[in-house]
Image (cartoon, rainbow, N blue to C red):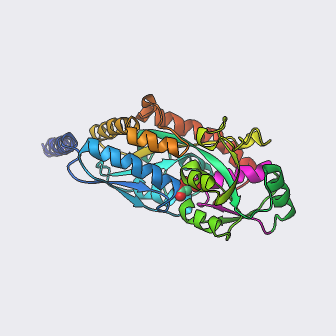
Amino acid sequence: MKILNAVLGATALAAVSLVSTIAQAAGYPERQITMVVPFAAGGPTDTVARLVAESMSKTLGQQIVVENVGGAGGTLGAARVANADADGYTVLLHHIGMATSDTLYRKLPYETLNAFEYVGLVTEVPMTLLARKDMEANDLAGLIEYAKANKDKVTVANAGIGAASHLCGMLFMSAIETPLVTVPYKGTGPAMTDLLGGQVDIMCDQTTNTTKQIQGGTVKAYAVTSPERLEILKDLPTVKEAGLPQMEVGIWHGVYAPKGTPKEAVDKLSEALKVALKDNNVSTRFAELGTAPSPESDATPEALKAKLESEIARWKPVIEAAGQYAD
Ligand code: MLT
């Protein structure tokens, strides 16, 4: 009889917990949501997040507050969300680094494919290969020659191992078969400050952080990593035109929630993301920054899950060939 009571008791408890979860999700969201950006404020990921969060807030009827958690190439911010309460009030906006970190870090503080619920894809941003304004080289061939001749002193800025800027810098060094001195920052916002000040020589960063600088002539730009030239940077050759097709890469971004977040909450976040990607303010601002919203069909959990799985598989051999690991 005692066993039966125990089983009935446990079943009743589970039922109460399930009902309260569904009830909570049914009224979701009832308070502000935190969107973690795993890089410093003022960088490309932060820019994308704030634009999307502003629009999603309107649809959800609750403020989405962006929290910058930089460090370790984005993995500290990802870990912050992996370990957050799975109640729909903490989400992560991250990019290709979610895939590359899975190979780069042999001791990640979370299991990439098991720690998150997927909300949807956001945008895919091209990268631009830049140097400080007074860099001697005026084209990519000249930059490669300069880098090879000065490999022990040329510095390349990135946002830490696992960042998109780290990946692009790694592709550049692999392509020219020359290791250079890398300088990590908590984000390419602060890294850009040093590039503009001439404290660092080279950086490969997303157009969401570099378009204004390139248009303003405050940096030297050598190539863009998209398959075709960009409308807003027509004079900038592609890496393929400049002779480094292996540097072609697009920085896709996605929104995640902690594993176990109620499906009703994930669905409402995904619906709000779809609305944001059709928001004129978002698409206009993205266009000015050299990118575009992902198609609505990609703003789904299934699309983001498939992208992450395929990108882990794609970058694993490239990272292993470069022999660059975080630990
Ligand atoms: C990176 O991966 O390089 C990040 O996008 C940098 C940033 O957002 O600050």
* 174 over 293 or under it: above or below: below
Q: As drawn, is 215 to the left or to the right of 51?
A: right
At x 43% / y 50%, what residue is drawn? 49
Name the foreground residue: 271 vs 57: 57
In the rendered image, residue 283 lying in the magenta stretch gets the answer no
What percent of the width, then of the height, locates residue 286?
A: 48, 43
What percent of the width, then of the height, locates residue 229?
A: 66, 38
Name the foreground residue: 15 vs 45: 45
Q: As drawn, is 144 to the left or to the right of 103?
A: right
Residue with the most extreme front position: 216
At x 45% / y 62%, what residue is drawn? 69
At x 58% / y 67%, what residue is drawn? 193
* 114 over 220 or under it: above or below: above
Name the foreground residue: 24 vs 253: 253
Q: As drawn, is 253 to the left or to the right of 202?
A: left
Q: As drawn, is 314 to the left or to the right of 23?
A: right
Residue 19, quarter of the rendered image: top left
Q: Quadrant of ligand 1?
A: bottom right
Residue 24, quarter of the rendered image: top left
Residue with the most extreme top position: 297
What percent of the width, then of the height, locates residue 184?
A: 62, 65
Q: Is residue 58 visible?
A: yes
In the rendered image, residue 168 lying in the magenta stretch gets the answer yes
The span picked out in magenta is 153-175
| Picture quarter with the C terminus | bottom right
What percent of the width, then of the height, locates residue 143?
A: 80, 55
| Picture quarter with the N terminus | top left
At x 63% / y 53%, what residue is drawn? 214
